[in-house]
Image: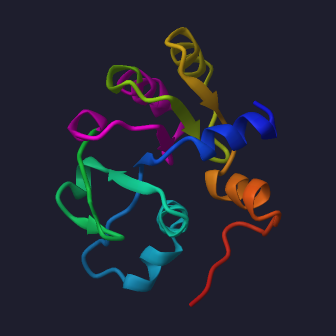
Amino acid sequence: MNDNQIKEILKNSKIIAMIGVSSEKKGEDPKNLKRKPANIVMKYMQDFGYKVIPVNPFAKGEVINGEVVVESLDKISEKVDIVDIFRPSNETPGFAKESVKIGAKTLWLQYGIKNQEAKKISEEANIKYIENKCIKQEYQKLFQKSNPVFPVLKN
């Protein structure tokens, strides 16, 4: 997938389902939450006008960055454009199948995540497939012409 194709996807997408956004654990310092890559990326994409729906079965009903966490993709009532995954590569085929079921347009595997089976499932269903790329970094590179180190952590 080249930069122009990725730019088109980001330009034509409004709703991102983000799998693997973390909730605050009991006794955890709330500052830690802000340092988790999925949470950083979620907030960033929200700041640029995307609706980001957090998906995490262990945090169902909690509110993260102003959005209620859903337990699975099929619990989202809106039409999802991008399913963005922050989970281990071996879990992605299941998410690919769910993405097909809900009619998502793009399956996006974050930096460091790749899976041939997920790619095959996506391509057979005519879903665009991006792997091993950070949606935040791609947005910055393509729309803001900057290429910062990820993650940028501020206290």
Question: Split into 4 quadrants, where in the image is the C terminus?
Answer: bottom right
Q: Quadrant of residue 133?
A: top right
Where 131 falls versus 39 (above or below)?
A: above
The answer to whether any part of residue 132 appears in the image is no
Where 24 falls versus 108 (above or below)?
A: below
Q: Where does residue 14 sit, x and y in percent of width and height?
A: 47, 48
Is 86 in front, or is 5?
Answer: 5
Residue at 62% in and 46% down: 11
Residue at 49% in and 39% down: 82
Q: Where does residue 126 sit, x and y in percent of width and height?
A: 54, 14
The reply, left or right, for residue 79 in relation to residue 89 is: left
Q: Where does residue 76 sit, x and y in percent of width and height?
A: 25, 41
Seen as rendered, the residue at the extreme top is 124
Q: Quadrant of residue 91?
A: top left
Is residue 27 on the magenta stretch?
no
Where 132 falls versus 39 (above or below)?
A: above
The answer to whether any part of residue 154 appears in the image is yes
The reply, left or right, for residue 25 in relation to residue 22 is: left
The reply, left or right, for residue 3 in relation to residue 50 is: right
Q: Where does residue 120 sit, x and y in percent of width and height?
A: 58, 13
Seen as rendered, the residue at the extreme front is 12
The reply, left or right, for residue 116 in relation to residue 34 is: right
Is residue 93 on the magenta stretch?
yes
Residue at 25% in and 47% down: 57
Magenta-highlighted residues: 73-99
